[in-house]
Image: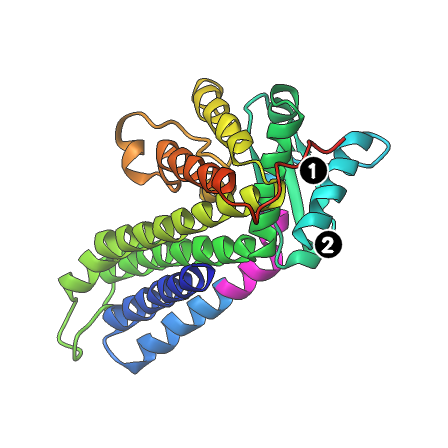
Amino acid sequence: MAGINQLKTLLLLALLSGLIVLAGYLLVGDEQGLYYGLGFAALGSFGSWYYSDRAALSAFKAQPTSRAEAPELFDRIQTLSDRAAVPNPTLYIVPSESPNAFATGRDPNHAAIALTKGIIDLLPPDELDAVIAHELTHVRNRDTLTQAVAGTLAGSLTYLGRILTFGALYFPVARVGRRGNNPIAILFLLVVGPLSAGLLRMAISRTREYAADAGAAEITQNPLALVRALEKLDAIGQEVPIHGNPAFTPLFIVNPLSKKGLMALFLTHPPTEDRIERLKLLAQKQETSVEIPQALSPVV
């Protein structure tokens, strides 16, 4: 299953890059446009690879935390990191009462986990373990990089469309065979391209969330703890939303934005109910399997 999810993610990222290249070609109308598109895709991917962690952490005013400030949290993360077989990530605290968490970083050796003040105060030890294990699975699977690249590529397509479409409207930029402005190119860059990029990005995010839930169940051997955590985070998070750049929404364990109105059409996370049902099935399999040990006690 993990191999299939990785393949799906690579294909979706390839489609996103292809949309950027197509956008460049439609605007210019010749091979030069392909080079523009490739350049945007390459620069966007490199920038997201190198700067994604700093951008995400600063967007939500996350503050680095030392062991002296939160010794129990440090011990908890260390124990769970050992179980997940990943390097110990840097811990950040987000000064928000909204209960949520996310992981970021270009690779496991440069990873960070950010926990909001709200989630630390809300969840009991076993449920907090499950949330941290979910984020550690993202680190182990390198989802933090995947999401950063996907977000940057989607943003690059939208930016490319806005800037160059403005030029197409007022200058002879977008041409087909140098016969004049191409309305199809303008429509693609204003509507079809960004919408398609957003849908592809959502598909990537949803695939990775299911995998991270399964990873948390594997690390803690306690799927129902994550079930209880998701139920609380989903309910309370809607009452106390977090404020920050919506471009980083896919990083969080649950959607931090409102699900009301048109926002429900653009959710980057799978329905919490579906995630809970999958976790309950994993719990049932654990109960009936003699090969899987009993649930590990919470980290203390």
Task: Give the x, y percent position of residue 14.
Answer: 37, 68
Question: Label 2: which residue?
Answer: 87
Secondary structure under the numbered disc 2 in the rendered image: loop
Say left or right for 205 vs 28. right
Which range of residues does the magenta coloring cover?
45-55
Residue 34 sits above or below residue 186 on the image: below
Three-letter amino acid code at the position of disc 2: Pro
Image quarter hosting the C terminus: top right
47 part of magenta stretch: yes
Q: Main secondary structure of the magenta part?
A: helix
Say left or right for 20 vs 87. left
Task: Give the x, y percent position of residue 108.
Answer: 66, 57
Q: Which residue is drawn at 46% across and 59% down?
A: 2
**Quarter holding residue 118:** top right
Dot 1 alpha-carbon crowd within 10 angstroms: few under 14, some 14 to 19, many 20 or more: many
**Quarter holding residue 297:** top right
Question: Label 1: which residue?
Answer: 92
Cα distance between the residues tagged 2 and 1: 16 Å
